[in-house]
Image: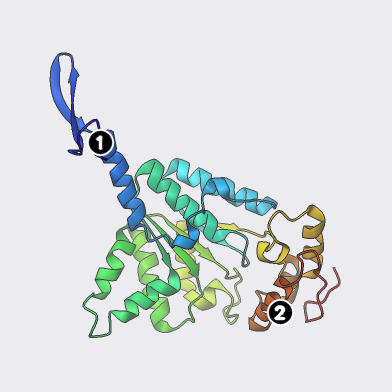
Amino acid sequence: MACPLCNDTRWRSVVADGVERVVRCDCWRAAVLERLMAEARIPSRYARCELSTFEHDMDSQREAHRRAAAFVESFPVVDRGLLLYGPHGVGKTHLAVGILKAAIRAKGARGYFFETRELLRLVRDTYNRSVEETEMDVLAPVLQADLLVLDDLGAERTSEWVQETLGLVVNTRYNARRPTIFTSNLVDSPDSTDPRTFIFQLGARTRSRLAEMCDWVEIRGVDVREVGPHASPDTIQRWQKQSPASPDNLRRAGGLPGKGKAMARARLRDQPPVELAWPGGRAGTKG
Ligand SMILES: [Zn+2]
């Protein structure tokens, strides 16, 4: 249906002080926002992720939500981005997507969502001769966006090329003072031999750049994929004591779950959420 105000010309005339002039119609802004949102590359599985739909059961989730809302409020007048890090399933990507959508809607930001692994794949594909896109075709929007979400930093197996490519993105955005929202399951520890740390995966230089350009927000929530949504405080407490994937036990075991634990998790998921007795494993069952 054509816009009743401007008949889809996107301009309409107004008379002020007896002088007639043309201004942008309201529908123009709506159309611009719709286009920005469509171009933001937010995967459809995150269609419902908004800041307003973020569930925060734990203090660190509440704090992260507060920081996310404050970021959007100040955007684009922000000095630093956010680095949301913590274990699986605490809502890091939900928050990052919520920030991006809110910045587009409220501020008209030109922003993009990229899963780190997908971005690296797109760049790598350009080295293939049958692909006409160049590396810079892929990277230009990433480097120039008003706001970039780089999801799951460190999920890609590290290599010199991976570190160099991510370093280019991080450095360019840092130099241009363009804010970035990162999410990551990596752990912040100075141990450069531990493959679960930022320093191992990204290198010391990029890690320290990230420290300069982002506020680091650690989220230590419960894993909703293990306890189910709307878990009672009792269930959460039991989970914190028993699950090897809980933040407390992860810390005790020295890091994030590996493949064996992921399989064990899949088994856990098939059980009713309150039955969280853990059949063994090095993280132990004692709380
Ligand atoms: Zn109109």
User: Residue at left 52%, top 54%?
Assistant: 49
Amino acid at pointer 1: Cys
x%, y% of residue 189?
61, 71
What residue does disc 1 label?
3
Q: Quadrant of the N terminus?
A: top left
In this view, the residue farthest toward the bottom is 129
Of marks 2 and 1, the one in the foreground: 1
Ligand 1 visible in quadrant: top left
x%, y% of residue 243?
76, 70
Badge 2 element:
helix
User: Residue at left 28%, top 37%?
Assistant: 27
Question: Would the CB of label 1 be found within 8 Å of ligand 1?
Answer: yes
Badge 1 element:
loop
x%, y% of residue 84?
55, 59
Horizontal side of residue 183 vs 42, given as left or right: right
The quadrant holding residue 23 is top left
Amino acid at pointer 2: Ala
Q: Which mark is residue 264?
A: 2
Horizontal side of residue 116 vs 269, given as left or right: left
**Which mark is first along the chain, 1 or 2?**
1
- How packed mark 1 is, by other alpha carbons closer than 10 Å (few <14, some 14-19, many 20 or more), is few
Tally the marks: 2
Residue 177 can be seen in this image: no
Considering depth in this image, is 18 or 164 the residue closer to the camera? 18
User: Residue at left 56%, top 59%?
Assistant: 92
Above or below, comparing residue 281 to residue 198 in the picture: below
Q: Which mark is residue 205?
A: none
User: Residue at left 34%, top 59%?
Assistant: 175
